[in-house]
Image (cartoon, coloured by chain):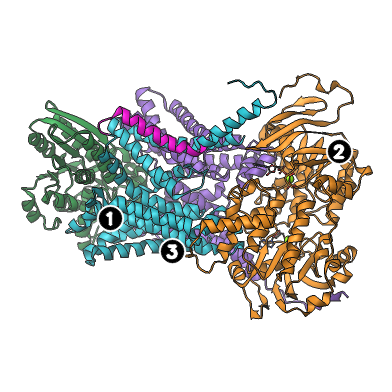
Chain colours: A green, B cyan, C purple, D orange
Amino acid sequence: GGSSSNSGGDDSFSVGIVRFAPSEVTTEAVINKYTKLAEDEGWEVTTANPDGAVDKAIGAMQDFVQKDVDLIIVSVIESTSLAAGLKSAEAAGIPVASIAGGTADGIVFDLVVSPGTEVPEAMVANMGGKGRVLALGYKPGLPCQLREDGFNEAVKGTDITVDRQEVLIPGQLESGQKFATTWLAKNPKGSEPLSIWACFDDPAMGSIVAAKQAGRDDVKIYGYDGTPPALKALKDGQLAATAAPDTAGAAQMLFDATPGLIEAGVGADAKTEEIPYPIITPETLDQYLADNPGANAS
Amino acid sequence: MTSLMENEPTAEVAKSNAHFFEWFGRYGALLVLAALITVTSILAPSTFPTVDNAINILNQSALSAIIAMGLTFVLVTGEFDLSIGNTASLAGVSACALMVSADLSIPMALVAILLVGAVVGLVNGFVVTYMNVSALVATLGVGTIVIGVNYMISDGAPVALGDPDAFLEITFGRFLGIPYPVYIMLAIAALLWWLLNRTVLGQSMQAVGGNRVAAELSGIRVDRVRVIAFVVCSMCAAVTGFLLASRTGSAAVSAGDTYLLSAFAASFFGSAVLRDGQFHILGTLVGVITVSVGFNSIALIGLETYWQYFFQGLLLILGVGVGTLARRRAAA
Amino acid sequence: MTSLMENEPTAEVAKSNAHFFEWFGRYGALLVLAALITVTSILAPSTFPTVDNAINILNQSALSAIIAMGLTFVLVTGEFDLSIGNTASLAGVSACALMVSADLSIPMALVAILLVGAVVGLVNGFVVTYMNVSALVATLGVGTIVIGVNYMISDGAPVALGDPDAFLEITFGRFLGIPYPVYIMLAIAALLWWLLNRTVLGQSMQAVGGNRVAAELSGIRVDRVRVIAFVVCSMCAAVTGFLLASRTGSAAVSAGDTYLLSAFAASFFGSAVLRDGQFHILGTLVGVITVSVGFNSIALIGLETYWQYFFQGLLLILGVGVGTLARRRAAA
Amino acid sequence: MATSETDTGADATPAGLLQMRGISKSFGGSRALDGVSIEVESGSVHALCGANGAGKSTLVKILAGLERADEGEILLDGRRVEVDNPRDAADLGLSFIHQELNLVPKFSVLQNMAMGSGDPGRFGILDLRRLRREARAVQERLGFDIPLDVQVEQLSVSDRWMVSLGRSLMRDARFIAMDEPTASFTDEEANRLMSVIEELTSEGVGILYISHRLDEVLEVSDRITVFRNGQKVTTLESSQTDRQELTTQIVGREVEKLVSRLEAEADESVAETRPVRLQVRALTRAPRVLQASFDVHEGEIVGIAGLVGAGRTELARLLIGADRATGGTMVFNDAPYAPKSPHDALRAGIALVPEERRSQGLVLTDTVENNLAMAEHGAAASMRARFRPKSSRAAGQALMERFSVKARSIRDSAHHLSGGNQQKVVVGKYVRTNPGLLVLDEPTVGVDVGARAEIYRIITGLASEGTSVLVISSDFEELAICDRVLVMRAGRLIAEVPASEFDEDHLTALCFGSTESFGTTETETA
Ligand SMILES: Nc1ncnc2c1ncn2[C@@H]1O[C@H](COP(=O)(O)OP(=O)(O)OP(=O)(O)O)[C@@H](O)[C@H]1O
Ligand SMILES: Nc1ncnc2c1ncn2[C@@H]1O[C@H](COP(=O)(O)OP(=O)(O)OP(=O)(O)O)[C@@H](O)[C@H]1O
Ligand SMILES: [Mg+2]
Ligand SMILES: [Mg+2]
């Protein structure tokens, strides 16, 4: 491990990244792209996978402190709950950046994922402001929470009834499917406008499976993330909308900021950048694919 | 009814009591299922007791049932397998990866993942028999390594098919109004039941599970039997993983992991169905279906999600506990 | 006529081989740890073999060690506990919930969650002993119910303290440069070791685990011993959950769940340390530390993430397998 | 149970130390005990005799708090006591040696002896030094000197029984029940036990003694109660009865005396002239079997005598490939024979009836039917072969009839059978594979006189059909059914005694020769 914290410019840096979990597709994509950019530049990137566990994430941060990296990047886990790791990093003079984890003492850079409010807004518009929605939320995840806040904001004051269920991770697809299956059985076709909103694509995919199995085409399903299967479902008209962050752009943003962050060190003022999170509908899909050659919906 | 005879009554009463408890011990777990169906039918009369919903429940049970029945094989042999969830994930990931990158056809991919399953089973069997590591440790270790392989193949990201339609058909296709997975489940159940109850292999497995030393001294090739059990189990897990991937035409590294605990729960519940603590295929099937019915009921009645945990936990404890308690009463 | 048979004396087989294998069987698991330390020290000489890093590793081991040592108690008694992860989560959630809504002080909250742990342990023990349900099923069931309780309390969302500083101090405070959790781990280890090896209760536990029938026949109150083991185990899990919450000043419904498998892995690895398959406190401690050292090494050397899985899996299989293989050789 | 709590022992004779009155116990539908009463006085030995399944152990288990009686009461010093669990029994000063070994294999001798012992010390803290002192004292009394820190799994079976015996003496018992304590003992060890019993009774301890060795019972006891089918048949004064009468009482009819092979058929030359079935040359697996060479002819019954620990079990295991020989050759039915596993042996036609029926012979939780089918599955060439439940059951039924196995039905679970019937099931399952050579390791340990005679009948019957039989036994009396007896000592076959010279004293003398000790490091295949 090389300690080059005092050198500036385009020197070779050493970066430690704490992933979240493989199920969090967006941040995984950002991290993978960032890693590629950095390694092309000759930096040393080490990643750790805490499998969603806060404690393991803290452990990974402390290991990176021992490794004496120049920058630690954490993701998704609320930064406030990483206090132990942040303190260790601060004591060692290593700045910490976060992807979608929010700010906290010790975070010098926060890449915010916007809540993507366009999705619920589109849903409300599609339903004409009335009907019934099955909302599949996931409270432990910050991005999901923010999206759900946006969702609640959008439905407020409309004639839409919300049935909320909590998705399980792991097993997100199954729980989406199970909840949707029974919900669909309870709400037969033609009763009122029906939609299923999920705070990420996996449970939405599960809902699609349920709808297909029940032979239902009257339900509009919404998700977030723009995973390949979701884009495919969008293309086939099974998904009404998803939202996809510009992961390449976000990775570039983070990459560009890295030397500055290392230069400024731990004392620096916290910066925040927002990753745009535009809605993708079947109409805008082609445009999105053209703009993001990496995205895959075949 | 009062009997005025002096020398009989206590024994008589005790006896009929014993009979009742014996009956209860045998059918207690089935009673739980019956009660569940009755109650939900009353509470949700228009949505629960319908043919559609029955098919729906069976369909939801299919994947869990396949993996749980495979696990039952290992349990019958007196072993454990903690790697099934990871094997299911691996099967999905490798099926998709093979179809995407090696352009395999669906049947070829199925063959390939059956092989993958068999290999995992062989490794489990090898570590358990040759290295003499307890099955719990061995399969925990092998399972962990399988996760690593998953990551290596997929780099952590979901693997999606470009044109999944044919693949999706496996999950969504229907014959006589019943989805294919239900047929697959029933076919595998029949095959495994036959293997276990109508072949020397199956009888040997039960003997090995009952007393390994006695089985060995009876000439049964214990190690071979154990390895076969692991292989069958892993192959069932692989089938589950394959079907799981065919739901969405894509596979994630940890998609199958949740099946581990549910398969154990179903098998143990099933061991209390009609038997006193022996694992068997029919029981496992009933166990899986009971859990599905329960989940379905909770959702249809519209209880909070956390009720599903209470329900699942209680189901397991009561389904098994009532039986053993009743049997103890019957024996006393 | 009785015919006497002639008998030439045969050469005695050299025993030194057996001695070597015996030694290897005993110290094999420790050798794995030593090899790990040596290799990493060579590959990362400036970062790995430092006092700071050693403290770091111990600190990272603390929580896992506490829950794993509790589990060891149950394993020693010949039982299982699949609910520890959920109990740890419950402890965190209820500690935070009590501090937030009931305004409990930190010591009072600790007492409260110790009680919570004890209650979970009692329920486990009751289902296992009184209802006669096998520990695997019982604790799987109780664990599932505990998840439900978690959701009921927290509604699924993380519970965060308003002013967590004092609470965080439990994790961050240091005495003589060593963080508190390390002391807590060592204190609990000493206490549990003493309980297990120097009290009648501990001997009884080992006896029950070694041969339950024999223990029962010799007048040991087997059921009571088993219940106590479950209670101790759940209380250790609760302590881990409490400390986990104090790392973050908040608690999530499933924060502790990951500890389940790692605790099992550590205990089983530990059973191969110095003993042939018996669970013991020191072994578990070594097991936890070996895993931590491994992770630390991977991070410091900078390997791909999936190596952590390969490492963990191989560690388990080899740590246990080498020992048993060697012992078999020694016996042969 | 409707008896007054007060002074029930007030009537007639002064109350003995321990009384059990009107004890009944049923398992499921069947009665194991039916209104049985016994009485053990201080300082006396009361023996219980009865066929397998007569209910002897059940009575002991009730006394020990392991089973609850349906009816009846227990009185200690004339006062009624409740024994709900073993702890209660221990607190009342009742001590037990149960029929099955109950040790913790991974524990040391000391730990095993100290298990559950009397008062737990202050605050439940172990007082190792005191326990060690006490254990030494007990060891001295019993005259055995196994190091206290050795794990019991490394001890031989008879040493384990000594440990078990030692444990029952660790607490100051006023009463000790011994359920077949000598089943695995040599005569010498049994004699030592007898002297310990004498010592104990002289200290006023009451002893309940159960054994199938009738001579021993007659020697040690003051009175003998005989059970038959859960009922008390009679109580005899030991000094006024003999073996003949006892046997008749136990079985309910006369049992013909064991017919020696010599008297029954045969001049030995017949056997010698028959073709050799198994030829063993220099078979070795150090240190327990060294250079064993012998022949077994067709239809011949060959005995192997020796002291416990002589290595006979090991030799038998080598014959069926359960362990691998390190040297030597075998020829079976004129073909070279080198089994790698019991499967190979069964396929070639050699079967071993193992010495421990419960742990090595049966799946106790499974049905008699499945137990009887097990070896046939093991002998099947391919595991893919069809299993036909109906014909399998018919075959099982036929075996049950042939060996007159007594069970409620063929679907009854094996652990419900009495020891003798269990043994018949084990023999039956191997006979079902039609072996050319049947090896029986201690076939009658714990088997009652009646069933024993039946097992001998089975053995001689098989031999007359042409099956060769190898019988390992520590009960030299039963070796009378053999055509020849090989004597094994310290891993070597040292002598061969033809039936014509058969004499128990002669065999005993040969077995002893000189004693050697071996490193007992083998671990059991648990
Ligand atoms: N747990 C049980 N369940 C059912 N039946 C039992 C049980 N224990 C004993 N029995 C039955 O009770 C009867 C008496 O058994 P017990 O063990 O007391 O016989 P025993 O006289 O000790 O015989 P042995 O000489 O073989 O030891 C037998 O028929 C036996 O099958
Ligand atoms: N290699 C082995 N594997 C498994 N069990 C063994 C082995 N060697 C001995 N035993 C068992 O250990 C016990 C102790 O053996 P023991 O000292 O009685 O010698 P033995 O060889 O069985 O002598 P014998 O049969 O002449 O009494 C026996 O019950 C035997 O079954
Ligand atoms: Mg008995
Ligand atoms: Mg023997």
- Looking at this view, is D417 or B12 the one in front? B12
Which residue corresponds to mark 3? B122
Looking at the picture, do discs 3 and 2 lie on one chain? no
Position in image of residue B2 (x %, y %): 61, 20
Which residue corresponds to mark 1? B156
* The CB of the residue at mark 2 lies under 8 Å from ligand 1: no
Is residue A292 shown above or below D321? Answer: above
Position in image of residue D382 (x %, y %): 50, 68
How crowded pointer 2 is (Cα within 10 Å; few <14, some 14-19, many 20+) is rated as some
Q: Quadrant of ligand 4?
A: bottom right
SS class of the residue under badge 1? loop
Q: Amino acid at mark 1?
A: Gly
Q: Quadrant of residue A188?
A: top left
SS class of the residue under badge 3? helix
Q: Amino acid at mark 2?
A: Thr
Q: Is residue C232 magenta?
A: no
- Looking at this view, is B95 or C94 the one in front? B95
Q: Residue furthest right?
A: D240
Q: Which quadrant: the N terminus of chain B?
A: top right
Q: CA distance from mark 2 to mark 1?
A: 80 Å
Q: Mark 3 — on which chain does it sit?
A: B
Which residue corresponds to the image point at 33% horizontal and 31% vertical from the top-left? B40
Is residue B104 shown above or below A62? Answer: below
Residue range (magenta):
B24-47
Which residue corresponds to mark 2? D235
